[in-house]
Image: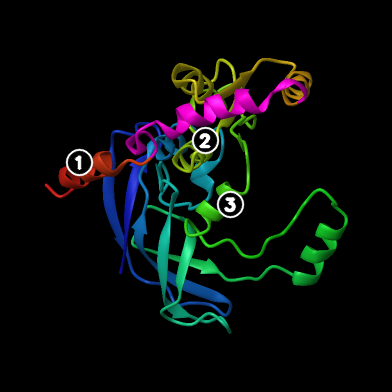
């Protein structure tokens, strides 16, 4: 059996839990048990913009209801795919459900390398291990790009990207858009730089004029910030106690 936490698409306050029988797997499919996931304000975004940005389309369910996408971990509990063994751990995009069936596939290594060779400004450092590689990645950069420009009319204006939290935790200043929520946060704490339009021109002038002293001053303020600003240990603990009631 699979349990699904469904949300009414027209009223996110209405929820229900539905159960379905496990379908027989087809060749090339894998059944995953979703055993750990994050729950953040992003998930509210997925629901609020579920129709406009097609978040409901990732995991279709009963008419009028939706499954909010979640980033998390799953374990392979059944497999009809060569090379994908039962017990394997998977990180990815899951539905708000106990199980999900996916079609397994693989990146074509030849095409991947050919694409990289055509782009001299891209460097591939090998497979990314979620979270475990973050410190090494951020120790190798001086700035974090937090200028989210995908949906400048709505979502990008008020989201706080993971890059802000990751970079802040490892002491890397962010570059952000003035007037956006992440930009306001950067300005309020003076832990990075923000830019108005035209972004291209202002960014070029910034990199041409910034001095080591300017950078060290911002980096010093960032290093003095409490880790709780970037890691939600206490918030998550309180949320967990509420959900356990």
Q: Please, is residue 208 above or below residue 86 in the view? A: above
Q: Kindly state the secondary structure of the residue where label 3 is placed.
A: helix
Can you tell which quarter of the image residue 98 is in? bottom left
Q: Local crowd at mark 2 within 10 Å, few (<14), some, or many (≥20)? A: few
Q: Local crowd at mark 1 within 10 Å, few (<14), some, or many (≥20)? A: few
Q: Which residue is mark 3?
A: 137
Q: How far apart in space, not on screen, are marks 1 and 3 (Cα)?
A: 30 Å
**Residue occupying the point 71% across, 15% down:** 197
Q: Please, is residue 182 above or below residue 55 in the view? A: above
Q: Which x, y percent locates residue 1?
A: 30, 69
Chain-order first, disc 2 or disc 1: 2
Q: Please, is residue 88 above or below residue 96 in the view? A: below
Can you tell which quarter of the image residue 206 is in? top right
Q: How far apart in space, not on screen, are marks 2 and 3 (Cα)?
A: 35 Å
Secondary structure mostly seen in the magenta stretch: helix
Chain-order first, disc 1 or disc 3: 3
Q: Which residues are magenta?
A: 208-230
Q: Which residue is mark 1?
A: 238
Q: Is residue 155 visible?
A: no
Q: Which x, y percent locates residue 17?
A: 27, 52
**Front tag of 2 and 3:** 3
**Residue occupying the point 73% across, 24% down:** 203
Q: How far apart in space, not on screen, are marks 2 and 1 (Cα)?
A: 31 Å
Specify whether 57 is left or right of 121.
left
């Amino acid at each position: 059996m699979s349990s699904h936490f469904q949300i009414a698409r027209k009223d996110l306050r209405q929820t229900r839990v539905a159960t379905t029988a496990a379908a027989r797997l087809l060749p090339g499919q894998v059944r995953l048990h979703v055993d750990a996931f994050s729950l953040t304000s992003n998930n509210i975004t997925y629901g609020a913009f579920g129709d406009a940005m097609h978040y409901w389309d990732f995991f279709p369910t009963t008419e009028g209801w939706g499954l909010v996408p979640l980033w998390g971990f799953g374990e392979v509990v059944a497999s009809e795919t060569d090379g994908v063994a039962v017990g394997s751990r998977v990180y990815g995009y899951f539905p708000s459900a106990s199980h999900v069936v996916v079609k397994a596939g693989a990146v074509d290594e030849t095409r991947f390398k050919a694409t990289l060779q055509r782009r001299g400004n891209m460097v591939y450092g090998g497979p990314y291990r979620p979270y475990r590689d973050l410190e090494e990645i951020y120790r190798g950069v001086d700035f974090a790009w937090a200028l989210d420009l995908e949906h400048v009319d709505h979502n990008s204006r008020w989201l706080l990207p993971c890059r802000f939290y990751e970079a802040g935790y490892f002491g890397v200043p962010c570059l952000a858009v003035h007037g956006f929520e992440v930009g306001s946060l950067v300005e309020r704490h003076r832990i990075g730089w923000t830019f108005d339009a035209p972004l291209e021109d202002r960014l070029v002038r910034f990199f041409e004029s910034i001095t080591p002293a300017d950078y060290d001053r911002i980096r010093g303020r960032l290093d003095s910030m409490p880790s709780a600003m970037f890691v939600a240990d206490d918030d998550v603990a309180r949320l967990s106690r509420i959900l356990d009631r």
